[in-house]
Image: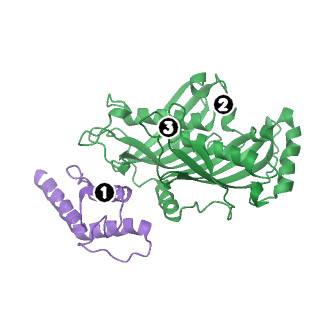
Chain colours: A green, B purple
Amino acid sequence: MIETFDLTPSHVGLGDLNEFALLTLVANTHYRILTQGTNATPRRIVDKAGEALYPSVFALHLQAPIRRPIEAHVLWEKLSVGADVRCFGRSFLDVRGVVGRAGEVPDAPEKWTSAPLPSVCWAGAWTLKGEVAMPAPPFVANVPHAAAPPVLLAMFRAAQSRGTIAEAPGALTPSAPILYPVVAGRDVARGRQMMFSQFVVVMDHAERVFLTERVWPSFPCELIECRTTLERRIFYFGNCRADDVVETVVGACLEKVARPSDEDLPFVPGAIVALTMALTDKNSRRLVALCETRKLLAIPSNQVGLLRDAERMLARHGEHTPLKELRQC
Amino acid sequence: MLNIETLVHEKVLAIVRLRRPTAQAVTAEDELRNDLGLDSLDLAQLGAEIESALDVPVFDGVAVGAILTIGDLTAMCEETLAKTRRVS
């Protein structure tokens, strides 16, 4: 399913497209696939006993090509959002999504991950009180079937058993926890759990605090504003509600990045920040999520002075060397 | 002739090996949750794998998570298949 609409302030405020909005927009389209032909809203999908089910996300992988950062999609742009959902059994959901300018999204979902556009895939399942559940017929009867479970499910189990993400670079030095109080109305609706896309906001907060306040020398705030996500993997093991406090432990290192030969990029690539994060519920000590992210410091062409800051950060912190907190220096 | 017991044991062992790759074998008496440590995610995948292999909706009446042992699971599959054959 491909939907085309204006990117408006109701999606992104007065900013441009961001990770949170991208994930939420793909989720919106995937909800329409899940309910098509049923006359039901997602909240009306129930199991055999009539209990309302929720389509939970277990593992997510987002990618954005360097030539098409997520933020390249600007306010008021005519945006196309594609979503494709396959059911394995009656519980598992294998979801793919993509965003592009109107007319850019290929019709065939198989081409989305190789298209030069921001894309995401996630493995999910219908759940009830944290347990995987099964919608009663006729729900999801119209959703195409998959022959095998979502590929990300195996990675989810591996990450769950290890407590780390195998692909994460090296043994990063974990930071002291960075706290994020979950606030009703801002992060979550009272009485409900946090939406999977909101975790990106929590992670971005921890990342910002770590880079601008914890490491030494710290990253200038203007340089931090230049970050754009190239890749993110999240494994969700739990969730949060209003008044919970999330503790995030961050590890990070810098990588040099080659300047593409293209002359038409509106920015100069400064460096890549590779991060891993572990999110824990402060009160229960439950592991809530693991994440790894690669972000590009994309220096706007009219602010090349910031390139010196990026070079200085690489010179002081080194490449592929864990960033150290001030207390460790 | 499809041997249901063999199929169920193979499917269960495959799911167990997702968590414990060195697992050798399972028995009819093994409890899915208590002995094999399967959680609701594993059990849902097991149910989907079995339904896909048998091409019948085995778990319409009873969720796979409510089944205690592998023997119970085998019996349920055999019963569902027998009902399906009678209807057809």
Q: Which mark is residue A40?
A: none
Q: Residues within 10 Å of mark 2 (few under 14, many from 20)?
A: many
In the rendered structure, the residue with mark 3 lies on which chain?
Answer: A
Residue marked by disc 3? A83
Q: Amino acid at mark 1?
A: Gly
Q: What is the spatial separation of the Cα atoms under label 1 and label 2, in whole angstroms?
A: 42 Å
Distance in Å between CA atoms under marks 2 and 3? 17 Å
Chain under numbered label 1: B
Q: Residue at x 49, y 64 (%)?
A: A161
Q: Secondary structure at mark 3?
A: strand
Q: Residues within 10 Å of mark 3 (few under 14, many from 20)?
A: many
Q: Amino acid at mark 2?
A: His
Residue B41 in the figure: left or right of residue A163: left
| Rendering coords of residue A187 (x, y %) | 53, 36
Pick out the residue farthest to the bottom.
Answer: B24
Question: Foreground residue, A92 or A251?
Answer: A251
At 51% from the left edge and 28% from the top edge, which residue is drawn? A3
Q: Which residue is mark 2?
A: A73
The answer to whether residue B16 is visible is yes
* Residue B54 in the image, given as x and y percentages of width and height: 26, 58
Viewport quadrant of the N terminus of chain B = bottom left
Q: Which label sits in the foreground, 2 or 3?
A: 2
Tag 1–tag 2 contact (CB < 8 Å): no
Q: Which mark is residue B47?
A: 1
